[in-house]
Each structure stands twice: as structure tokens, then as C-alpha cells.
Amino acid sequence: MPGAHHYKREDLIASIFVLAYNQEKFIRQTLDSLLAQKTSFTFKIVIGDDASTDLTSSICEEYALKFPQVIDYHRNEENLGLMGNFVQTASRLEGKYIAICDGDDYWINEEKLERQVSFLEENLQYAVVGTGVQLLLNDGQIREKSPAHLQEYSLTEMIADNKIVAPTAVFRNYKTIQSLPSWFKDMPYGDWPLYLMALQEYQAKACVLPGLTSVYRLQTGGESFKMRQTLSKVYKNNALILEHLLSEKFMKSISKELKDGWKAQKFKQVLALHNENHASKAFIYFCKLSFLYPSLQRLKHYLYALKKRT
């Protein structure tokens, strides 16, 4: 337990960002795994409960009463939806670092938070750090995903593809996170744009450390999971997120990288639509993209994709 009985607001080093909704089967395991963290600093568990209709709220209230100096629990009076709850809970995040662990995921290494915060303290060139992860399927199968050594990612690489699995992430806090743009509420997921904003804020890189620290439930039926199932939808949503980030003044310094990333995501959407047997829609989207941003390389790639499908 992290010095909970001596908690002072000015001593808070990290906030753990927890979204919960109807997760009575999982939330105890989640909170127990967070409370088990062994750290040399104080942290706070910030829970946003989106008006759960099962026993999730009762369980969270039980833990909040038992650990009042560690757990900051809030239950919405009405359901705000995944991202409405995301934005509201993010406004309560404090401290120098932010970690993420949704109410159906959990941590399996008691040194996780200490290790990642210490790493960021000692390596100022990074703003976001993830780790290896266990991917847990509904049938109980576990797939492990962990690099053999530290994997470093530039801003451009993070724009191209999110390399950090949410429950493994720790990143440097920044002011914008407490007043996220209104468009966040319309997005299917928020972890990736948070990372990009942190990388821009600190002009830094991201990385993934070797070693398993977290379990990510892949098929619990959540809204965010469903939105990530069809690749064409994933790329469409990624492009929309980048488009919104491009419109923000605080992201102006990386507008070129965001625009290049937007083009790449739109082209990935075209290719995914082909693979999903939506050739006519893919052709229309490709023509629109080519009209706005002609590219011989993309044309060759598109024609090659057509040839492979015939």
C-alpha cells in the first residue's frame, strides 16, 4: 500500500484512470490489483462509474469507504456513454503521471507503477511508456505480447499505429487532459489521442518495456472493443481522431505529421474496405483521396491490391 495514511494532495505523483460500467464480475480484481502496487510515492485511483445498473457501484463504494485516501470515486447520476464518462473522469486526474486501467482489466505485477514512473523520471526523452501485456479472450485463452527489449517509437510511428495497450500505459500529465475538447465525447476510444497529445506536449517519444504487467480483456463486449473489430472502421475512426487533433491550436506544431498520418489512415481504410468485399466503396474513397492528395505510390499500391483480389 502506497503511504495511503499519509496522503497529501501536494504529494500525489500519479493518478490511475479507471472507467467502470456494469463490471461487477471484474471490478474487485481490478481494484485489488491497483491497491497492491508497491511504490515509493503516493498515487490515487480515480474511478468514473457511468451509472452502473449492476453491483459495480456498490463494490466501488465499498472500496472507496475502505480506502478513502487512495480512491477517488464518482458515480454519474445518469449514463454518459463511454466517452462522456472518459472526458468527465479525465477532468479529475491529478499528479505528475497518469496510468490507465479500465474496470475489466487488471495488473499482474506489483512493481508496475513504480517501474514505469521511475523510468520516466530517469528518461526525459520519453513521455509515454507501455509494457508487455497478456491478452485474455472470453474462452480463457491467454496470448502474451511483450518485446524482448525496449522498443522505441517516434511521434510519427505513434500516429501511424497505437503501440501502447491501454492497461500497460503510464504517461506524463498535462493541463489539456483536464479539459479535453468536446469532440472527444464522439470518439470510440480516447487512449491513443491522449498519448499523441502527451508526445506533442513534451516533444518526446514513446516506448514499450519488456515484461508482462497487465491483463487486457479482449472480448468483454464493451463499446470500445466492438468499434475496433472491423478494420475499415478502425482506420476511419483513427482518421477522424487525427482530423480533430489537426483542428486544435495546441497541436499546430505537429500539423504536418498529423496530416500525413490522416492520409495514411484513409488509405488503410480503402485497402481494408477492399478486403471486406466493399470494392465500389473503396474505389470511391480512393478517388476522393487521390483528388485531394495525388500520390503515385498510393496509386501503385491500390492497383496492386486490385490485382491481388482478382
Image: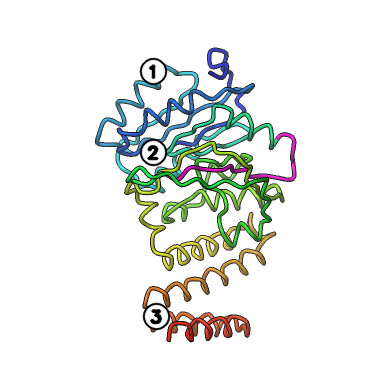
Residue 43 drawn at (x, y percent): 56, 26
Q: Report whether 22 appears left or right of 270.
A: left
Residue interval drawn in magenta: 121-135
* Point 53% across, 84% down: residue: 304
Residue where numbered disc 2 is placed: 104
Q: Nearer the viewer, residue 107 or 84?
A: 107
Looking at marks 1 and 3 on the same chain, the residue that comes earlier in the sequence is marked by 1
**Alpha-carbon span between mark 2 and mark 3:** 36 Å
**Alpha-carbon span between mark 1 and mark 3:** 54 Å
* Point 34% across, 36% down: residue: 76
**Disc number for residue 65:** 1
Residue sitting at the far left: 53
Q: Is residue 122 magenta?
A: yes
Say what secondary structure mark 1 lies in: helix
- Tell me the kind of residue under disc 1: Leu
Above or below, comparing residue 307 to residue 23 in the picture: below
Above or below, comparing residue 232 to residue 180 in the picture: below
Looking at marks 1 and 2 on the same chain, the residue that comes earlier in the sequence is marked by 1
**Local crowd size for mark 3, using a 10 Å CA cut-off: few (<14), some (14–19), many (≥20):** few
* Point 59% across, 58% down: residue: 248
Residue sitting at the far top: 5
Q: Report whether 98 appears left or right of 182.
A: right
Looking at marks 2 and 3 on the same chain, the residue that comes earlier in the sequence is marked by 2
Residue 80 drawn at (x, y percent): 34, 45
**Alpha-carbon span between mark 1 and mark 2:** 21 Å
* Point 69% across, 59% down: residue: 253
The answer to whether the residue labelled 1 contacts the one labelled 2, judged by CB atoms less than 8 Å apart, is: no
Query: Quadrant location of the C terminus?
Result: bottom left
**Disc number for residue 281:** 3
- Tell me the kind of residue under disc 2: Asp
Mark 1 or 3: the one toward you: 3
Residue 236 drawn at (x, y percent): 46, 67
